[in-house]
Image: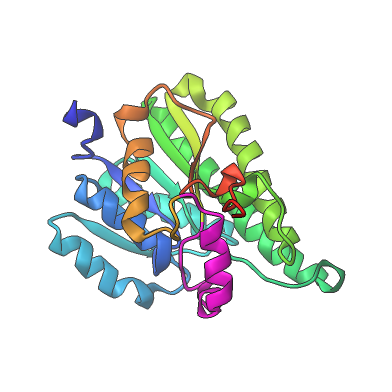
Amino acid sequence: MQDLFDLSGKVAIVTGASRGLGQYFGRALAKAGADLVITSRTLSSLAEFKKEIESLGRKALAVQADVLSQSDIENMVRMTIEEYGKIDILVNNAGLNIRSPSADFSWEDWDTVLDTNLKGNFFCAQAVAKEMIKRNYGRIINMGSCTCVFGMEGIAPYTASRGGVLMMTRSLAAEWGKYGITVNVLAPGWFKTTQNAALYENKQWVENIKSRIPLNRPGLPNDLDGTVIFLASDASAYITGQMILVDGGFTTGATKAIT
């Protein structure tokens, strides 16, 4: 049974791996046996993480890649094939958020959010799938969030992009299943990252969030390990077009009882 989760001999690309969740995912996959390709818009930001992965006994190829650039995406795939000869896993993690009242949101910022979170994810998946199709095997994990299933004020473009990722994932799963490629969404709940760190400085906000999470705490880095390994491994071979929420129960809509 343990062999179902063993990633030894697998090659995984993790985009947006210079910090935060991207590093959590990369670390978990490496510990499960995978060799990595880690990407960031700034190559130097990957240096320390590359060393960390190599200290675990795994290989790590650092690649400069902006998911808004078609040539960068194509180069990422080309360098991966040159280094490893194949791609087994893609964790489509690169993304961003811009917070603003919807009435004030600029045209340019809308494009930045949607192009990064949705368009960039699609074309990374497309480029990687072309290689996976050749081998009739692949695991594509697209990043979602709780906002795949509900809205939230001040981040309308972000919620639109995450909802789009879910529907895009289902379409790709329907199209690429015949090639042995699974495509799923991993949707974290409230995890503290560089992107949302400012929110966690507000103790009242943190207590309000905790009150709506049945497990009574925000997520910790290792809370995502099992799910990303599961979706990357043969344990999930018959699961595609699905979303797994790792949110401590936040999307149950729970609130503490009034006593």
138 or 214: which is nearer to us?
214
Q: Which residue corresponds to the image point at 75% horizontal and 59% vertical from the top-left?
A: 156
The one of 135 and 202 positioned closer to us in this rendering: 202
Q: Would you say residue 117 is visible in this rendering? A: yes
Residue at image location 54% in from the left, 50% down from the top: 250
> Magenta stretch containing residue 209, yes or no?
yes
Bounds of the magenta span?
190-214
Q: Position of residue 112 (x, y in %)?
A: 68, 66
What percent of the width, then of the height, locates residue 104? 84, 74
Looking at the image, the residue that sits furthest to the front is 259
Colour approach in the figure: rainbow
The C terminus lies in quadrant? bottom right
Q: Give the residue drawn at x 26%, y 66%.
A: 50
Which image quadrant is residue 5 in?
top left
Location of residue 37 in the rendering, given as x and y in whole percent from the top left corner: 33, 55
Image quarter (top left, top right, bottom left or bottom right) of the N terminus = top left
Would residue 83 be visible to someone looking at this image?
no
Dividing the picture into quarters, in which one does residue 233 lie? top left
Q: In the image as oriented, which residue stretches furthest toward the right?
A: 103
Determine the residue located farthest toward the top in the rendered image.
Answer: 178
Q: Is residue 10 left or right of residue 66?
A: left
